[in-house]
Amino acid sequence: MEAARSGDRAALDELVRVTYTGTYTLAYRLTGNEDDARDVVQEAYLRAYRGLRRFRGDAQFTTWLYRITANCSANLLAKRARTRTETLADDALVVDGRAEHDPEGRIAGEDDRARVAGALAVLPWRLRQVIVLRDIYDLPHGSIATELGISEAAAKVRLHRARRRLRELLTSEAGAGDGKEAVGVRAS
Amino acid sequence: MSGLAEIVRLRTVDCRQAGEFLPMLAAGEHGSAGLSTYGRPRLADGRPSEGRSTEGRATEGRATEGPATEGRATEGRATEGPATEGRASEGRASEGRSAEAVPEQVADHVAQCLRCQAEMAAYRRILRHLRALRHDDVRSPPGALAAVLAALEVAALEDHAGGANRALRVAAVGGITVATAAATTAGVLVWMSRRRLGLAETG
């Protein structure tokens, strides 16, 4: 880390290699698709590279990098939402056309975690972002609010809505008729 | 029969109210600022007051009910029911206090209601699965890492080139400054020597 900060290219490359998978995973979960995740990750590393000297080291490098990634993702998705003619309301029912999330096409024995991940992937992006950052990556509310450019109160309300929406999605998915109970209501 | 209907109605209302708090309760955030303004009312001397604030305006120490709305509620105004994004003046209606944020009647209801307990357990299970996702890496497409490294290489080269250009600019400016100073000095010396010569000739 110190070597990378002092401009050692090999150390920087190694730092990227070590953190790449985690960063890509976060970007993918935030954006919901490969192409956007690639763009977000590249932008995040470039920004991290330019800001590396300012990184004080009072947080873990990955935490700092994840915050940058969240910010890049929020910027990308917000920009796209502004330019898109067809907007998607947060409360609109989103139909996921991908085969891996199609209840009929799901392979037997798919575990609950995969179902949660599938439901997460079809959440509207504004809701998905907060739930990914808080409930998966455990970022503090304040950091989430900062990186998403909203107030802390707004971030918490959005999180509340996201959790409820995720629960509804899982329940409705279970009710869609594959015989399984929802993740949430199945006995442990 | 009407008594039974009333019990069912009350129970449904309780479950609906409690349902608003279940995600927070499941996440252990029942007292977190921002999501709950449903606190136990307290009088100025700190004693809990009875009932809930249903007035349009609540002064400090009075309760507001329900999770905070994002954008709408203004400071001191009671908000009732679940949060609605986009309507509360942010950060104000959201200062829940940890142990007091969830009203006692909701906590009591959840403690007795199997349906709410099951729902809360469902939320807990979802949260557990979400946390577990942290360790599920998504495989990146081939070439993605190489592209990042190449982009960083380009950025480093640009920085280097920028640094070299800056050095060249500094050297050029320095050279011009030195040359100007030398020329000025030479000019002054020539002028002084000519002046001295002129004075000698007149003398």
Image: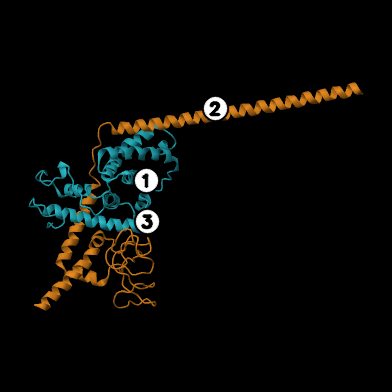
Chain colours: A cyan, B orange
The image shows residue A34 at horizontal and vertical percentages of: 25, 38
Left or right, B173 with reference to A115: right
Dividing the picture into quadrants, the one containing residue A2 is top left
The image shows residue B10 at horizontal and vertical percentages of: 17, 73
Dividing the picture into quadrants, the one containing residue A79 is top left
The residue under label 3 is which amino acid type? Ser
Q: Is residue B187 visible?
A: yes
In this rendering, is residue B136 above or below B33? above
Labelled disc at residue B168:
2
The residue under label 2 is which amino acid type? Leu
Left or right, A46 with reference to A104: right
Residue occupied by mark 3? A151
Q: Pointer 2 and pointer 1: residues touching (CB < 8 Å)?
A: no
In this rendering, is residue A138 above or below B23? above
Q: Foreground residue, A94 or B199?
A: A94
Q: Foreground residue, B60 or B107?
A: B60
